[in-house]
Image: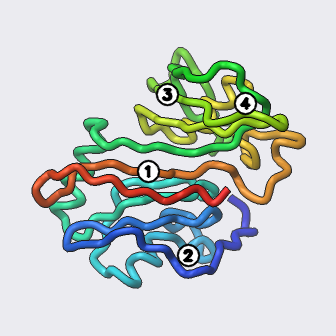
Amino acid sequence: MSSDYNPPQEPLEFLHDDHEVVLVNKPAGLLSVPGKGEHLADCLMARVKAVFPTALLIHRLDRDTSGVMIFGLTPHAQRHLGLQFEKRQTKKTYIARVAGEMTQKTGTVDLPICVDWENRPRQKIDHENGRSALTDWRVVRAGNGETRVRLMPKTGRSHQLRVHMLSLGHPILGDPFYATGEALDHPRMMLHSETFQFRHPDGGQGTRITAKAPF
């Protein structure tokens, strides 16, 4: 990541908080956690900690992805939610705008992903060395040379949705790593984490938090 990091400065939108967890609508362009070097210190984690000093990291979103992120406020919550992620018990739904008009209405991408070492942090499909990655998708609408699609990842690989949509020939619009030409010419990457479902660390009740896509 280069030194041209200019994260958005608008106030954070807190979606929910209680004695165990806080959920935030992460803006696009803001790192989830600090990068290497002082110029990459500003991040969602630091901003959340300024308001909730006990906040603990559980998962991340890519810098250019916006949407729902959860933080634990106690070690118990961090452990509880960490296990839910590990056992794939959380459910996330994303909204994306992708290049081209998809003709099929629904589908699943089942293609293994690993880091593209020569082009880090890019990832790639690799049937020999990749880790299994599974994404369900459903078209919301298509027209004007693009498609709005709902993405339901079943695994949590790095850049999974971005690589899987590229593998279908429909890169996410504005994606700085995987889109090219006109598909790259957008003010931001058109990927947003819209809903997050989890079991609450206090009592296990099913909880669903939503942040509407800003595009």
* Label 4 element class: loop
Judge by depth and name the residue closer to the eye, 82 or 130.
82
Q: Which of marks 2 and 3 is nearer the N terminus?
A: 2
Mark 1: amino acid: Thr
Q: Distance between the residues labelled 4 and 1?
A: 22 Å
Q: Distance between the residues labelled 1 and 2?
A: 25 Å
Is any atom of residue 171 visible in this view?
Answer: no
Q: In the drawing, does residue 180 fall left or right of residue 54?
A: right
Residue tagged 1: 195
Q: Which colour scheme is used?
A: rainbow
* Label 1 element class: strand
Judge by depth and name the residue closer to the eye, 125 or 84.
84
* Disc nearest the viewer among 1 and 2: 1
Q: Looking at the rendered structure, which numbered label has been put on residue 170?
A: 4
The reply to whether the C-beta atoms of the residues labelled 4 and 3 are less than 8 Å apart is no
Residue tagged 2: 42
Is any atom of residue 150 visible in this view?
Answer: yes
At x 13% / y 60%, what residue is drawn? 202
Mark 4: amino acid: His
